[in-house]
Amino acid sequence: MISWEEVTSMGIRCSLKKGEKEAGRAYLFLIRNELHSAPYGLLEDVYVEEQFRSSGIGTELVQTVINLARELGCYKLIATSRIERGEVHEWYEGLGFLRYGYEFRLDF
């Protein structure tokens, strides 16, 4: 028999505005499991509006999430990207992320 219990995790939305317009956003999800006493972070939904791309906003958002994950005691931060997005992979590596494994996914 399989049992389950609810575990509390948390999501934090970070955004950056230029004037009155939101120029970009990123989410930090804090996820807990029984293997570690500290949570790990998942960087998700990094998005910069087209007119603001290549201006450093994405980097500023990701750096904010990295710093927040450290402040909140995460033992690691994971970022995912579609396999065909080589330029994004290089950008993440430039921010200190390492290529580590594969992501597997089921769409429902």
Image (cartoon, rainbow, N blue to C red):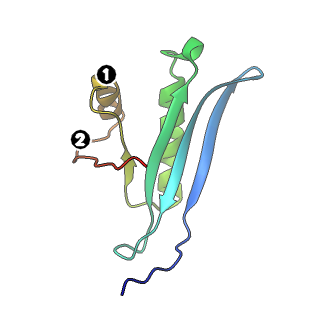
Residue 87 numbered tag: 1
Residue type for callout 1: Glu
Name the foreground residue: 32 vs 1. 1
Residue 49 numbered tag: none
Using the image, determine if residue 72 lies above or below residue 95: below
Q: Residue at x 75, y 20 (%)?
A: 19
> In the image, 81: left or right of 46?
left
Q: Which residue is under mark 2?
A: 99
Q: Residue at x 28, y 49 (%)?
A: 104
Name the foreground residue: 5 vs 57. 5
Farthest right residue in view = 20
How far is disc 1 from disc 2 in space, using C-alphas? 13 Å
Contact between labelled residues 2 and 1, with CB atoms less than 8 Å apart: no
> In the image, 49: left or right of 80?
right
Farthest top residue in view = 51
> In the image, 40: left or right of 90?
right
Residue type for callout 2: Arg
The mark tally for this picture is 2
Count residues near mark 1 (Cα–Cα under 10 Å), then give few for <14, some for 14-19, many for 20+. few
Using the image, determine if residue 57 lies above or below residue 7: above
Q: Position of residue 7 (x, y in %)?
A: 52, 73
- Labels 1 and 2: the sequence-earlier one: 1
Q: Position of residue 90 (x, y in %)?
A: 29, 27
Q: Residue at x 54, y 64 (%)?
A: 9
Q: Position of residue 97 (x, y in %)?
A: 31, 40
